[in-house]
């Protein structure tokens, strides 16, 4: 779920995408909350397609390096799916850079007919299992992978998401057999963010994932690529506008509500 209120209980169902869709869709979530609360949208490396069942038109939010805030978000009951750079391009024909740091109506990217069809059919479907099945079927039908002109940059994006990612962008470029400038220009062209920024967001996301484990502690995050505790504290504050302890508590509460 892309934006989470702090006060109101909610329902969240998370599913990983089927194997054939994983290069394009990281996964999806169904969500329901009783009222619209102030929401914090945390840093994310993917584009997020959001379909709300209560009347809001479907939208796509882009990758973002710092937390953003929405007052009384209209997202109350619906679904969200995370799109990789390859998924954004294959689904809409537009590079993910076009939505970086922005929110765009899905109709502007996918066409009004398909956007309305997706929202209408998902909202009319009775169960979460049926909704996820319909979502995967529509994505499978609509995805149109291109000729792979940006294959190397897409591969580099995935490498930065991995726990064993290269320590520096120079190391990444050397691993790929290209110059650092090639990597930097490629990320700007395809993703709309620098590779260093993508690496920082990926480390933040790995931290969030590590804190979702039932046995997690604050110190669990130190294994995600931070130099030391002060480095962890600075990065968490800069990217989430919360202290590590506040974000850890938020993530643990989210995990418990989703179970």
Image (cartoon, rainbow, N blue to C red):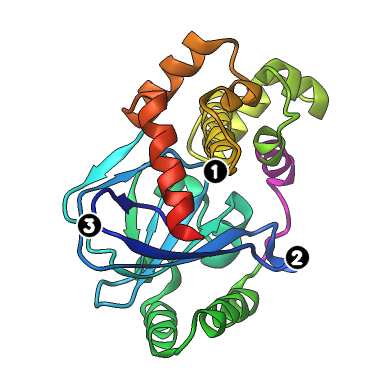
Say if mark 3 contacts mark 1, CB within 8 Å.
no
72 horizontally vs 48: left or right: left
Magenta segment, which residues?
145-157
Task: Report the residue marked by disc 3.
Answer: 73
Q: Position of residue 84 (x, y in %)?
A: 59, 52
Q: Residues within 10 Å of mark 1 (few under 14, many from 20)?
A: many
**What quarter of the picture does the N terminus occupy?**
bottom left
Q: Position of residue 227 (x, y in %)?
A: 60, 11
Measured Cα–Cα span from mark 3 to mark 1: 24 Å
Residue 253 shows in this picture: yes
Say if mark 2 contacts mark 3, CB within 8 Å.
no
12 horizontally vs 198: left or right: left
Q: Position of residue 232 (x, y in %)?
A: 50, 18
Q: Is residue 153 magenta?
A: yes
Residue at x 48%, y 85% (from the top left corner): 127
Closer to the camera in the image, 105 or 15: 15
Say if mark 2 contacts mark 1, CB within 8 Å.
no
From the viewer's perspective, is the residue at label 3 or at label 1 nearer? 1
Closer to the camera in the image, 245 or 179: 245
Q: Position of residue 138 (x, y in %)?
A: 57, 80
Task: Report the residue marked by disc 1.
Answer: 212
Mark 3 or 1, nearer chain start: 3
Mark 2 or 1, nearer chain start: 2
């Amino acid at each position: 779920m892309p934006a989470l209120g702090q006060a109101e209980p909610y329902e969240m169902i998370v599913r990983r995408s089927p194997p054939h869709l994983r290069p394009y869709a990281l996964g999806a979530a169904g969500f329901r909350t009783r009222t619209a609360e102030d929401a914090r949208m945390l840093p994310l490396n993917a584009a997020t397609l959001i379909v709300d069942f209560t009347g809001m038109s479907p939208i796509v939010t882009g990758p973002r390096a710092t937390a953003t805030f929405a007052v009384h978000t209209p997202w109350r009951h619906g679904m969200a799916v995370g799109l990789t750079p390859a998924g954004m391009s294959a689904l809409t024909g537009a590079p993910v850079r076009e939505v970086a740091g922005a929110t765009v109506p899905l109709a502007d990217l996918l066409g009004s007919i398909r956007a309305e069809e997706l929202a209408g059919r998902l909202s009319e479907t009775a169960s979460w299992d049926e909704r996820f099945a319909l979502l995967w079927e529509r994505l499978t039908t609509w995805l149109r992978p291109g000729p792979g002109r940006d294959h190397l940059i897409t591969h580099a994006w995935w490498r930065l998401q991995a726990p064993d990612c290269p320590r520096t962008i120079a190391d990444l470029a050397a691993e790929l057999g290209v110059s650092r400038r090639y990597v930097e220009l490629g990320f700007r062209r395809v993703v709309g963010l620098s590779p260093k920024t993508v690496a920082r967001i990926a480390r933040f996301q790995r931290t969030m994932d590590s804190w979702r484990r039932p046995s997690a502690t604050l110190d669990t995050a130190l294994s995600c690529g931070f130099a030391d505790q002060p480095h962890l504290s600075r990065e968490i504050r800069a990217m989430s506008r919360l202290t590590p302890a506040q974000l850890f508590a938020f993530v643990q509460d989210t995990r418990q509500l989703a179970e």
